[in-house]
Image (cartoon, rainbow, N blue to C red):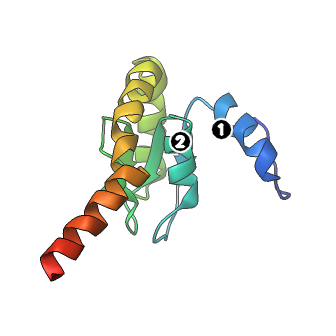
Amino acid sequence: MILKTEYVPKEAVKYFFCAADMIVQPYRDATQSGVTQIAYHFERPMLVTDVGGLSEIIPHNVVGYVTKVSADEIANAVFDFYINRREIEFSENMAVEKNKFGWGRIVQAIEGLAREIA
């Protein structure tokens, strides 16, 4: 395990995400997380706790896990990830799921809203 507590320049972010088997975000409190969108970009499976809006964008057992803020639940999900070799399955699902957050979908939503208003 590598603990990096100093600033990571944007050019180096890819090395950290691509080296990770899974991006674990055991937040106790959160609204959104830029880490989640970066993980989608690099198609890295995720584990998030069910706080804020994180569970809304991580389909449980599709691209990763949504757990309660509980050490046991987090540990069980990590255990399941490795024992059941879920990395390939989740990464492949990430490639599909991340399309929901692309610019094309955003433009479609804005155009749809503009038509509703007009």
Q: Specify whether residue 25 is in view.
A: no
Q: Residues within 10 Å of mark 2 (few under 14, many from 20)?
A: some
The amino acid at mark 2 is His
State the residue in front, 93 or 6.
93
Q: Quadrant of residue 84?
A: top left
Q: How many marks?
A: 2
State the residue in front, 91 or 50.
91
Return the residue found at the far front: 118
The amino acid at mark 1 is Phe
Q: Give the position of the C terminus as an image quadrant.
A: bottom left
Residue at (49% x, 43% y) in the render? 40
Please tell me whether mark 2 sits on a helix, a strand or a loop: helix
Res 17 label: 1
Return the residue found at the far bottom: 117
State the residue in front, 102 or 59.
102
- Looking at the image, do the residues carrying marks 1 and 2 touch, with CB atoms under 8 Å apart? yes
With 73 as the anchor, is 108 left or right in this view?
left
Q: Quadrant of residue 55?
A: bottom left
Residue at (26% x, 66% y) in the render? 111
Q: Position of residue 23 (x, y in %)?
A: 56, 42
CA distance for labels 1 and 2: 10 Å
With 35 as the anchor, is 108 left or right in this view?
left
Q: Position of residue 24 (x, y in %)?
A: 55, 45
Name which of mark 1 and mark 2 comes first in the sequence.
Answer: 1
With 71 as the anchor, is 117 left or right in this view?
left
Where is mark 2, residue-wise? 41
Q: Position of residue 15 (x, y in %)?
A: 75, 35
State the residue in front, 89 or 10.
10
